[in-house]
Image: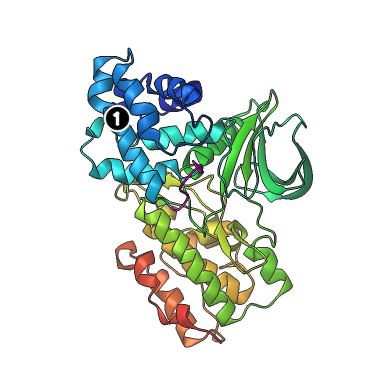
Amino acid sequence: MGNKIGRAIKSRRGSNLGESDVHVHGFGSVVDSAIRTASNAGTDVYSFSETVDNPMRSSGAPNNLHVHVHGFGSVVDSAIRTASNAGTAVYSFAEAVDNAMRSSGIDESVHGFASAVDNGIMSSNLEVSASALVDVHNLSPNGSGWQKGDFLGNGSFGTVYEGFTDDGSFFAVKEVSLLDDRSQGKQSIFQLQQEISLLSQLRHDNIVRYLGTEQDNYKLYIFLELVTKGSLRSLYHKYRLTDSQASAYTRQILSGLKYLHDRNVIHRDIKCANILVDANGSVKLADFGLAKATKSNDVKSIGGSPYWMAPEVVKLRKHGYGLAADIWSLGCTVLEMLTCQPPYSHLGKMEALSLIGKGHPPPLPESLSTDARDFILKCLQVNPNKRPTAAQLLDHPFLKRIS
């Protein structure tokens, strides 16, 4: 665990950890040693403070470690006791701990450390969660522990298959080749690594769950929750979606988007093909290969799928864009659900991009209900500053339709 966490911390240099690389360096080995000798050894991190704080105080760790992390264990312990996954679950370590750290008296230099620990735990051989859908313990991509099954689809980067474990559980696995030396291949590897880094920090009912990652000499793998009924795109090819069904799905999409936007994360590729549905009608945002953390309209790279792109993304110049781009894409996605076809489907990609860049929203058919039309038009305002936020849209009448 110590080495895994150490690597996770070092790999995040230049990220929002700031100087915590310096102050927390070596912390993992102290934790590792303490947990090995603790009575509750293994993945059980309850009573973390008792297990870790005392050994830290008496360890040979550098003085700056004592200064900046002293008392960290008690904050962790308190957060885990009150977390929804209390006990042995370590899946949401970052979510359970980061807020507590921010509001504690711990020095600011270790803020964000929990996210680095979380990534280390996720990529280690520790069990992800007591309630995880798939136990990824001992999974390895060489055929030992799981088998690759049916092709499920292509993400923005990587190919997705069904996975089947030795104990009979199912999951999804996204893979990308490590042997492709072309720029596109290298970009795919980079994007999948970005997706792993981001998804490992997210935990929400409407976001596909990250389960772990592995690689061999040939491929990089990301293990994900399997969502059984496929995408909304495949769904509307089988069934005609009513307003009430589109309303229920949109409400869940917005719940996931609000969670992302509250954390200043922009998805950048919201469309029906990237929204999954399970047999109970639960919706999961998926394919985070293009997602980015943003501070304030500071994204300055074009990303997304042409027919769903916002005008500010298409006509990107010196000015960046931000979270509101997802809201435009959401409007296009609701239109897609209700018409069973992408927006601007009567046009080629370049023609569509030209119109979007000039500020022309996609045409809305007369068959749309008043509430659906109003919801879509609010999302499709050309000026991003006039678009409602995800939180504001959750109060729209369209989301309250039941028939």
Amino acid type shown at disc 1: Gly
Residue 143 among those drawn in magenta: no
**Residue 87 on the magenta segment:** yes
- Residue 114 position within the rendered picture, expressed as x and y whole percent measured from the top left: 38, 36
Q: Disc 1 designates what residue?
A: 18
Residue 147 in sight from this viewpoint: yes
Q: Residue at x 69, y 22 (%)?
A: 217
Q: Residue at x 43, y 77 (%)?
A: 375
Please indicate whether residue 95 sits to the left or right of residue 246 in the image: left
Tally of numbered discs = 1
Picture quadrant of residue 395: bottom left
Task: Give the answer, above or below, for where 27 lies relative to 322.
Answer: above
Q: Secondary structure at mark 1?
A: loop
Counting from the top left corner in percent of width and height, residue 353 is at: 50, 58
> In the image as oriented, which residue stretches furthest toward the front?
39
Is 238 drawn above or below residue 9 in the view shown? below
Which secondary structure dominates the residues rendered in magenta? loop
Left or right, 385 with reference to 356: left
How far across and how far down the image is residue 207, in percent?
52, 55
Residue placed at 26% from the left, 21% from the top? Answer: 66
For image coordinates 35% across by 55% down, the residue present is 262
- Residue 180 percent across, percent down from the top left: 67, 28
The colour scheme used to paint the residues is rainbow
**Over which residues does the magenta segment extend?**
84-90
* Residue occupying the far top of the picture: 60
Determine crowd level at label 1: few under 14, some 14-19, many 20+ residues with C-alpha closer than 10 A: some
Q: In this view of the protein, can residue 311 be seen by the observer?
A: no
Quadrant location of the C terminus?
bottom right
